[in-house]
Amino acid sequence: MHDYMKALCYRFETPSKRAEELESAADRTYKQLAKQLGKQQRRLLLRLVDLEAALRNQSCLDSFMSGYRVAHGIHQELLRLQV
């Protein structure tokens, strides 16, 4: 079920222009900071960035799944009303 919902989420996902701008700004900031850090600190920073991206993706999927459940519930209620 999780993979199915993930596929649906990616199918209907429409990133906003603002989200793209924020991602670009975050990438530039990461690169600037990485230049100033040593090897160990860069690894730690990269791990933090990866975890943050995973958290953002999971949060997006969770939100999509919640919306899907609401829509499904509404659909079921409408079907019951038609009978």
Image (tube, rainbow, N blue to C red):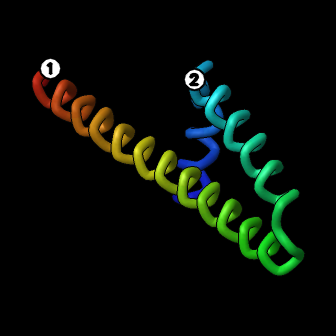
Report the amino acid beneath label 1.
Answer: Gln
Residue ID at (86%, 73%): 38
Residue with the mark numbered 1: 82
Query: In which quadrant will I find the C terminus?
Result: top left
Point out residue 7 in the picture as x, y percentages from the top left corner. 64, 44
Q: Where is residue 28, by image quadrant?
A: top right
Point out residue 78 in the picture as x, y percentages from the top left corner. 18, 25
Compare residues 50 and 3 and report the one nearer the observer. Answer: 50
Q: Where is residue 76, by image quadrant?
A: top left
Residue ID at (83%, 80%): 40
Residue ID at (68%, 42%): 26
Q: Residue furthest bottom?
A: 40
| Side of 13 where 50 appears, left or right | right
Residue 17 position (above or below residue 51): above
Residue ID at (21%, 27%): 79
Mark 1 surroundings within 10 Å by alpha-carbon count, few (fewer than 14), some (14 through 19), many (20 or more)? few
Which dot marks residue 42? none
Label 1, secondary structure: give it: helix
Point out residue 54 in the picture as x, y percentages from the top left corner. 62, 60
Residue with the mark numbered 2: 18
Compare residues 32 and 43 and report the one nearer the observer. Answer: 32
Label 2, secondary structure: give it: helix
Report the amino acid beneath label 2.
Answer: Arg
Q: Where is residue 12, by image quadrant?
A: top right
* Of callouts 1 and 2, the N-terminal one: 2
- Measure the C-alpha gap from mark 1 to mark 2: 41 Å
